[in-house]
Image (cartoon, rainbow, N blue to C red):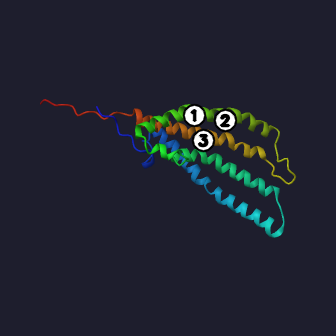
Amino acid sequence: MTEPAIPEPASGLYPETPLSARIDRVIRRIGEALSWLWLVLLAVIVFNVSLRTFLGIGSIALEEAQWHVYALGFLVGLAYCVQSDSHVRVDFLRIRMRPRTLAWIELYGTLLLLLPFTALVLFAALPFVRDAFVSSEISPSPGGLPLRWLVKAFLPLGFALLVAAGFARLLRVGAALFGARPHAPEHRTD
């Protein structure tokens, strides 16, 4: 019996399952919608630098806005990178491996590294955000932004999306490794 062909991850993600397709679609839509944040970040940076350079006006609120927009884009972007398989890889090792070996590495990496790490961050982030919310945390800097707890709330949200992306990836890799094997044609005698 032959093993099912496992596609090269670079040529297309692992085969979808109905649940992984739904999770991926939600993450892709969120990632695409929030990709506009990078233009917002660029505009805030250009505006802040222009004020400082040409008018000699510095703004703590604009600097903090840069950090907040970057944090939001980065935290949500992590899940999108996992979903689209566009995160950093060690390519000089990957090109020497068979697709099946890569799928096993993906499976173990997701089970032993990605999901436990994200669970640990979520476990630590929830009290962090709760404390910031309860105290109505604001910037300690004069002229800084209020509602710092709101930005901190994106930490568990971003990592929850990362867990979802990791789970969807796990489903796809599982389908590639353990999916239905092709059946040999039955021998008919009539």
Q: Position of residue 132 (x, y in %)?
A: 79, 39
Q: Are marks 3 and 1 in contact (CB under 8 Å)?
A: no
Q: Secondary structure at mark 1?
A: helix
Above or below, 66 relative to 9: below
- Residue 120 vs residue 173: left or right? right
Q: Residue 184 appears in which quarter of the rendering? A: top left
Tell us which disc is closer to us: 3 or 1: 1
N-term mark: 2 or 1: 1
Residue at coordinates 35% horizontally, 40% vertically from top-left?
A: 5
Horizontal side of 3 relative to 85 (left or right) equals left
Mark on residue 33?
Answer: none
The amino acid at mark 2 is Val
Cα distance between the residues tagged 3 and 2: 12 Å
Residue at x-position 75% and y-position 54%: 65
Which residue is under mark 2?
121
The residue carrying mark 1 is 113
Q: Which image quarter is the N terminus in? A: top left
Q: Amino acid at mark 3?
A: Leu
Residues under numbered marks 3 and 2 in contact, where contact means CB atoms less than 8 Å apart: no
Q: Determine the secondary structure under disc 2.
A: helix
Q: Residue furthest top?
A: 189
Residue drawn 49% across the image and 40% down it: 20
Q: Within 10 angstroms of label 1, few (less than 14), some, or many (20 or more) residues?
A: few
Label of residue 161 in the image:
3
Q: Total label count?
A: 3
